[in-house]
Amino acid sequence: MNRPEISLEFFPPKSLEASFRLWDTVQTLAPLGPRFVSVTYGAGGTTRELTRDAVATIHKHSGLRTAAHLTCVDATREETLTIARDFAKAGVTDIVALRGDPPKGSNGFVPTEGGFQNSCELIEALKDEGNFTIRVGAYPDKHPEAASATADVEYLKRKFDAGADEALTQFFFEAETFFRFRDACEKAGIDKPIVPGILPIENWKGARRFAEACGTKIPAWVIDAFEAAERDGRQDLLATTICTELCSDLLDGGVEQLHFYTLNRPELTRDVCYALGVTPQTGLENVA
């Protein structure tokens, strides 16, 4: 098993305590030498300013290549591109371009007047700016709003045709889910990198709710295993084992890069990476 390249996703803090937790997460995981880290938006664009500040801080003080999430929600085209240009001026030229989740309580995504209609329009506009590396989302399990799994693949191809450089997938529980998706993408003529998204499960109840909301299929054996582990107080051990085995299966199947959704809780991600041979790199121990 070869040592994979990793990337990491954080979310912006909403309190002083959360700010310290984010920075602790960055300091814990930076020595692993991620090829980039990203900072998310909240649903409905609710953390736009927090995302901007977190991206700028991590980029400036950690030395890590930092990517900003950017969505089509609640902003005009010019407002969105102004944000992107501000990132570029600050030295951040990696963007994760997404349509974005609608605000909570709404009936679905409705384009803002004068805004981007979908992620493909956003990608095309960013590509025209000429100075961004653009990553997009992909869905090994059918997106809740997609007509079919085939439609998901077709739309991903549209995003690559619009100018995307790489895709990061939603998390999943079994390697075969990713391999089927990868094969379908290759059959559709997609030849750009598709990186599997990995969720180390810090909290099973929360992960289960998240999976059900985003259409990720949960195998019965995973449910049974976590229910048993909760009774015995072995949740962290089980989570580390399941995640490590998933990553090992992916690497055995030819995957070379993994994208970890850290949820600003670094311990499980760190432990899984250590198990995969991803250990602190010389020269990064003192990142602060």
Image: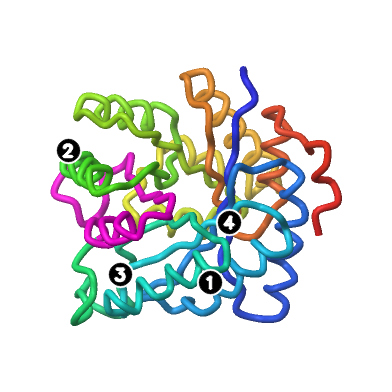
Q: Is residue 73 left or right of residue 36?
A: left
Place of residue 75 in the rendered image (x, y in percent of width and height, measured from the top left): 31, 79
Residue corresponding to mark 4: 66
Q: Viewer-nearest of labels 3 and 4?
A: 4
Q: Is residue 140 magenta?
A: yes
Task: Tell me what residue is drawn at x 48 percent, y 72 percent.
Answer: 86
Task: Tell me what residue is drawn at x 44 percent, y 45 percent.
Answer: 171
State the CA–CA distance, disc 3 to disc 1.
15 Å
State the CA–CA distance, disc 1 to disc 4.
11 Å
Question: In front: 133, or 24?
Answer: 133
Q: Which mark is residue 51?
A: 1
Q: Is residue 151 left or right of residue 28?
A: left
Q: Are marks 1 and 4 in contact (CB under 8 Å)?
A: no
Numbered disc 1: secondary structure: helix
Q: Is the image coloured rainbow, by chain, by secondary structure, or in one colour?
A: rainbow
Residue corresponding to mark 2: 150
State the CA–CA distance, disc 3 to disc 4.
20 Å
The C terminus - image quarter = bottom right
Residue corresponding to mark 3: 72
Please state the extent of the stretch shown in magenta in the rendering: 119-148
